């Protein structure tokens, strides 16, 4: 079954030599080869301001780059979100992207005296995080808290589920390890998983 996939490349450096971009490209190649439709959002290339107040966040008129991102996310059945682990969390520019995109009126809708209505139900996601440390160490010692926070506090809050994750450790490691992960990403793209 063909799916519509929005790829969110959350690496803050647009340098095409970054391994994260190669992983995103491999996922897209696998997805397209399997007949899925793909649209990409490269956060490092988007122009949007920081959210600095509640009034700004609740403003129904999103900046143009944010409105375009919302349109792509609304179109998609499945999201791939990929980012490097920086200081134990997602990079600040990606967090700001989510603060901009996941606004009330789009990602969720306030209701009087009730929990908000989830605006992005029916979508699934995969979160891929790259890091210099071993992935098992991040999972066992740090509890993969960045991934848990993104899943629980943002994606599930707006209705996106299921959310699967992949942790890619030792990214500065061997060429064999990188080649294996590129192959895995192609397979995940083909499966739209």
Image: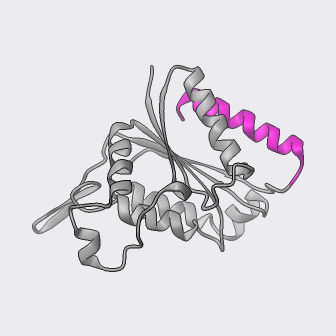
Residue 19: image location, x then y, percent: 73, 50
Residue under the point 59% across and 69% down: 89
Residue 182: image location, x then y, percent: 73, 38
Residue 119: image location, x then y, percent: 26, 50
Residue 6: image location, x then y, percent: 46, 40
Can you name the residue that lies furthest to the bottom here?
53
Q: Nearer the viewer, residue 60 or 81?
A: 60
Q: Main secondary structure of the magenta part?
A: helix
Can you name the residue that lies furthest to the left here?
112
Which coloring applies here? one colour
- Quarter of the view holding residue 181: top right
Quadrant for the N terminus, please. Answer: top left
Is residue 79 magenta-colored?
no
- Quarter of the view holding residue 146: bottom right
Task: State how many labels appear.
Answer: 0
Quadrant for the C terminus, please. Answer: top right
192 lies left or right of 124:
right
52 lies left or right of 188:
left
Residue under the point 61% across and 34% down: 188
Q: Which residues are magenta?
A: 173-193
Residue under the point 45% across and 68% down: 96
Is residue 175 magenta-colored?
yes
136 lies left or right of 114:
right
């Amino acid at each position: 079954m063909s799916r519509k996939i929005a790829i969110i490349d959350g690496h803050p450096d647009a340098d095409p030599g970054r391994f994260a971009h190669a992983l995103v490209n491999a996922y897209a190649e696998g997805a397209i080869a399997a007949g899925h439709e793909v649209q990409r959002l490269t956060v490092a290339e988007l122009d949007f301001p920081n959210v600095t107040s509640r009034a700004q966040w609740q403003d129904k008129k999103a900046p143009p780059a944010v409105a375009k991102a919302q349109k792509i996310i609304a179109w998609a059945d499945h999201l791939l979100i990929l980012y490097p682990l920086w200081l134990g969390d997602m990079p600040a520019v990606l967090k700001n992207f989510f603060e901009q995109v996941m606004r009330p009126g789009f990602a969720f809708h306030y209701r009087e005296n009730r929990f908000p209505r989830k605006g992005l139900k029916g979508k699934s996601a995969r979160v891929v995080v790259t890091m210099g440390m071993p992935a098992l160490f991040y999972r066992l010692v740090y509890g993969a808290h960045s991934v848990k926070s993104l899943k629980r506090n943002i994606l599930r809050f707006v209705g996106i589920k299921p959310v699967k994750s992949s942790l890619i450790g030792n990214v500065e490691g061997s060429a064999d390890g990188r080649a294996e992960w590129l192959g895995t990403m192609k397979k995940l793209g083909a499966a739209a998983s």
